[in-house]
Each structure stands twice: as structure tokens, then as C-alpha cells.
Amino acid sequence: MTTEMQEIAITEEKPLLPGQSDAVKSRVFTRGLLWCTTLFYTRLTKHTLLFITTKSKSCFSTLFKFEEMQEIVKNFTVVHVNAPGQEDGTAIYPAGYQYASMDQVSEMLPAVLQYFNFRTIIGVGVGAGAYILSKFTLTNPDAVEGLVLINIDTNARGFGSELAQPVLGNGKEEMSANTELIQTHRERISKAPNLINIELFWKSYQGRRDLNVERNNTFKCPVMLVVGDQAPYEEAAVECNSKLDPTTTSFLKPSKLTEAFKYFIQGMGYMASSCMTRLSRSRTTSLSSSYSMEGSRSRSRTLSQGSQGGQLPPSPSHTMEVSC
């Protein structure tokens, strides 16, 4: 990491006031400019959900409309961190510009935590964002309480990102069932004024290195993996799951994602006063039966070797995989 990346200058567009409901955009200067959109739903809390995205307006907007998600975020300070050059209105990078590597982007995140005075975060990322958060967590394990990794690929292979997948990566069946979504993303990319910046970001993600996550060098915090059925990242997520030493795997429909997220948060000791969802009650009562592997499961290959054969794992699960 260069000395330039260690020097931090901050320009604040609006004062960060506890209790305000509108989103506040802040600029954090590290190696490059990071735009952070901060949402205070009820008050400024010491517990933080950090989302790594390319565009905060579109990436998680649908997720935040769910009632269960509203119940979650009102207990946290929510910060969306946009990758360098991806915010609307940012200047186009000149020809020959050397975009930051995924490793370098992850090295920018400590400046964000320092700026907002966050000691720890719960990270949520999609595609490249999941990779960046994973890299940050491996380097700064004490700064991350939990991870929600969507379409994670820990290997240096393939092409794609959270923007490209809905357009280029889905199977024919999935694309035919989501024609409106596909068209929306196509128009969004084709009409983006900062298309050059997006292309540089894609190339940086395509040139990523292996995370080198192994059983003896893995995350120290709880992790929830989320991947779509027939998605191009399905096998990559299964491989990642095998490296995280899970004890059981749960497969849920998309409508259950927010419930799973809530259960994941409750499992870390937050939202204790919140009512337990049907999903968490069902998962609690059926946990012992999942170890016995009774019944045929078409996706049983995703279970770790430690949970096969009806043997109980030696330690509680720190990983949960959700397939939508």
C-alpha cells in the first residue's frame, strides 16, 4: 500500500446528524475517491451494516423495500460504499488511467471506518463487492463481525460482476423469466455516462487474484453465503462453502432471503427483542435432523464432509448458505 493511500482527506456534503431519515452522501479520499451513502433510519447507532456496491441506488433498492429488511436496518447505521468512479456524476477517467486493483480497493475501506468512527461492521457485498469485503476481512478480521456474501467467487477466474450477471451470466430459463429486469440492466449499462469507468471496474475484477481461503486460513466471523439456482456463481459459492468448514447448509426461496438475513443478525446477538421469524423457528427445530442426512437432497453435494454420515460437527456453525 502506498503512502498516498494512507493519507486521508474528507469533504462532507452535509452534516451527519443522528435521527435524520434522508440519505447523506460523503466523500472519502484514499487512493481514489469513495462515495459513501449513509442512511440513518432512527438514530445513529454503533452497529453498522456496510454495503459494497457499484451504485447504491439500484443494487439494493429492491431488498430494502421488504418489511423484514426495514425491521433490520432500523437497528443499524447503513452505509453504502460505491466503488471508485461508479457514482453518478463522477468524472470520466482519462485514457491510460490505471484503475485500482481489487486488493487496493479493499485497502481503502479502513479509511471509511476511520471517517465514520466505526470500530466494527457487518459487511454485505455482491459479486465484486463480496470479493472486496472478503479481502478486507482476511486482512482486518477484528473489524468485521459478520459477512453476507452474494455470488462470491474466491478464485481468479471468469468475467462478471453484480452489473454484468443479470445481462450476461444468467441461464436461458432465468433470463426468460426476468425479461424486464434484463432489459433494465441493459439500458442502464448502455446509457451510463461513465461507461468507461464501469469497464475499468470490470477489468479490475476480472484481473482479481485468488483469495486463498482455506480451512486453516478462513474467516473468523460468521458468514452467510447467498447464490441463485443456476447462476454462474453457483459452483463458486459451493466451493467457497467447502473452504469455510460449514456444519449444515440451508436452501431457501428468494422471498426468504430477508428472513434468513434477520436470523443471521439475531445469531450474532443483535435484535434480541425482535420476534423470531417462522424461518428461524423452523430452522431451530429441524437443525438436529439435518445432521442425520435423512431423505434425498438433490443439492447434498454442498454439505461439508464433516456433516456427512450422520456425525455431529465438533463446533457450532459459523456459516450459512442460502440458495435462491
Image (cartoon, rainbow, N blue to C red):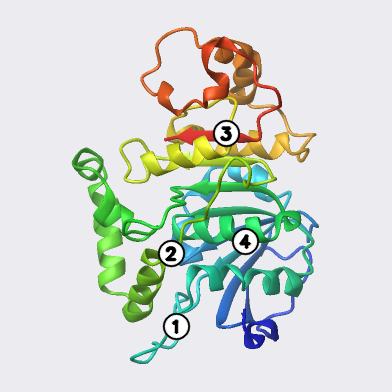
Query: How far is mark 1 from mark 3, CA to CA?
Result: 38 Å
Residue ID for mark 2 = 208
- For this view, does 280 lie left or right of residue 206? right
Q: Label 2 sits on what residue type?
A: Arg
Q: Is residue 193 in sight in this rendering?
A: no
State yes or no: discs 2 and 4 in contact (Cβ < 8 Å).
no
Which element type, helix, strand or loop, lies under badge 4?
A: helix
Say whether disc 1 or disc 3 marks the residue closer to the N-terminus: 1
State yes or no: discs 3 and 4 in contact (Cβ < 8 Å).
no
Which element type, helix, strand or loop, lies under badge 3?
A: strand
Question: Mark 4 or mark 1: which is in front?
Answer: 4
Query: How far is mark 3 from mark 4, CA to CA?
Result: 20 Å
Q: Label 3 sits on what residue type?
A: Met
Residue ID for mark 1 = 89
Say whether disc 2 or disc 1 marks the residue closer to the N-terminus: 1
Q: Residue at position x 63%, y 12% from top?
A: 288
Viewport quadrant of the N terminus? bottom right
> Residue 37: image x %, image y %?
60, 69
Residue ID for mark 4 = 136
Say whether disc 3 or disc 4 marks the residue closer to the N-terminus: 4
> Residue 44: image x %, image y %?
78, 61
Q: Residue at position x 52%, y 41% from top?
A: 225
Q: Residues within 10 Å of mark 1 (few under 14, many from 20)?
A: few
- For this view, does 236 lie left or right of residue 82? left
294 is higher (above) or lower (below) than 79 = above
270 is higher (above) or lower (below) than 158 = above
Decide which of 297, 177 is in the foreground and name it.
297
Decide which of 237, 27 is in the foreground and name it.
237
Question: Mark 1 or mark 3: which is in front?
Answer: 3
Residue ID for mark 3 = 320
